[in-house]
Amino acid sequence: MKTKQLLNFDIRSFDKIKTIIREISSTYVNYKQLNTYELSELYSPFIEKSIVQYIKSHLYRKKVYIINSNINITIYSCEQLSYEFELCVLLHIVSTILLTLHVFGKSTEHTELNIVYIDIDQPKYLNKIVHTENDIESGCIGRNINSGSTVVSTGNIKIWRRSELVRTLIHELIHSLCLDLKNTNIVECFTAHVTKVNGTINRFLYGFNFNEVYTEFITLHIYAIWRAYMDNTSVQHQFNQLIKSSVHQMNVLLNHLNKYNVKCSLHNSNIMSYIYLKTIIAKSKKMRNIMYKLIDVNGNNSIDDLICQLIDWIEPIVNNTFEHIFTNDKTFDYTSFMFYD
Ligand SMILES: [Zn+2]
């Protein structure tokens, strides 16, 4: 599917979920106590220490679902989940997989997936920033902010935050199914242009991981479709709501950095790519269109020109603005997007 068609996706055409859910009900189920080996399997370098500690002391049960014989979903939980809740989690995971595959024109039959979902509900918070001699941001934000990870070599996905299940799963699926920009020359081209300014590295933009910006940008669209499907509302409405929440997240983050006198562009975490660059691109219609063109472009000739347009627009914003660049919509309910200091 061409990316510019994403927001016009007809959600009524997506009706496979019920069939798949019927298949799931007859799959193999296994309950048992977690042992040391299983615990070690759950860890990821992206899980923050306190969450690992929480998992260690709380988690004790797992259930394995096999879908279409090539998609495994393992749900770890802290207690015996009610049938309704488990079904709900499953519905969220399966519908997200189906929708993401569908958008990219892939079939479930030819896709192998191994998804581990750890059902914990730990809040996100922003850590105190410690300035050190060589590292301006050691001990800084980022660790607690991730909600999932993908082991690129195996494609295995882990998600460990209930509130972010769907959004994170879409993001990780894009990585896992190699639908991101990793192997294209778009990322290369972006990096080359960033380093080319007057022959020196533009360090303000250099810290941004363009593949992560892309992955989050597409995630925003697929998540809007998913929410529209579930809420029976329009994709465009959901997209607008997601942009509002992104703006809010960005403002919270910038506030936090300002408090510790850290410039956002000097923060070398992908967080800035996940939130900041994604938001400023997604919020501008013009930039969105450039991004769509960039992603849908077949030949290499126009990539260079599109990247230049993108950078020309982003650069002054990133270089000069370290305060709030957008105002929050006061009528919007942000409770599920709060950070904790
Ligand atoms: Zn990522």
Image (tube, rainbow, N blue to C red):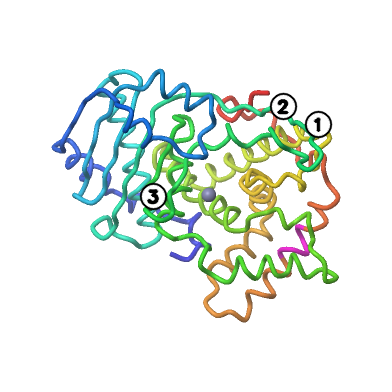
Q: Gap between marks 2 and 1, in whole Å? A: 8 Å
Report the span colored magenta.
Answer: 310-314
Q: Gap between marks 3 and 1, in whole Å? A: 44 Å
In the displayed structure, does residue 147 sit left or right of residue 196? left
- Based on the picture, tell me whether residue 133 belongs to the magenta stretch: no
Quarter of the rendering occupied by the C terminus: top right
Question: Percent from the top left, x then y, of residue 69?
Answer: 19, 49
User: Quarter-wise, where is residue 251 in the image?
Assistant: top right
User: Helix, strand or loop at disc 1?
Assistant: loop
Residue 247: numbered disc: none
User: Helix, strand or loop at disc 2?
Assistant: loop
Q: Are marks 2 and 1 in contact (CB under 8 Å)?
A: yes
- Residue at (36% x, 55% y) in the render: 101
Q: Specify which label sits upstream in the sequence, 2 or 3.
A: 3
Q: Gap between marks 2 and 3, in whole Å? A: 43 Å
Find disc 1 in the rendering and name its residue.
260
Total of numbered circles in the picture?
3
Find disc 3 in the rendering and name its residue.
11
Question: Percent from the top left, x then y, of residue 127?
Answer: 67, 28
In the displayed structure, does residue 155 sit left or right of residue 238? left
Q: Amino acid at mark 1?
A: Tyr
Question: Percent from the top left, x then y, of residue 171?
Answer: 48, 48
Find disc 2 in the rendering and name its residue.
128
In the displayed structure, does residue 152 sit left or right of residue 316? left
Q: Are marks 3 and 1 in contact (CB under 8 Å)?
A: no
Q: Amino acid at mark 3?
A: Ile
Q: Specify which label sits upstream in the sequence, 3 or 1.
A: 3
User: Quarter-wise, where is residue 339 in the image?
Assistant: top right
- Residue at (54% x, 37% y) in the render: 146
Q: Are marks 2 and 3 in contact (CB under 8 Å)?
A: no
Question: Percent from the top left, x then y, of residue 8?
Answer: 48, 56
User: Helix, strand or loop at disc 3?
Assistant: helix
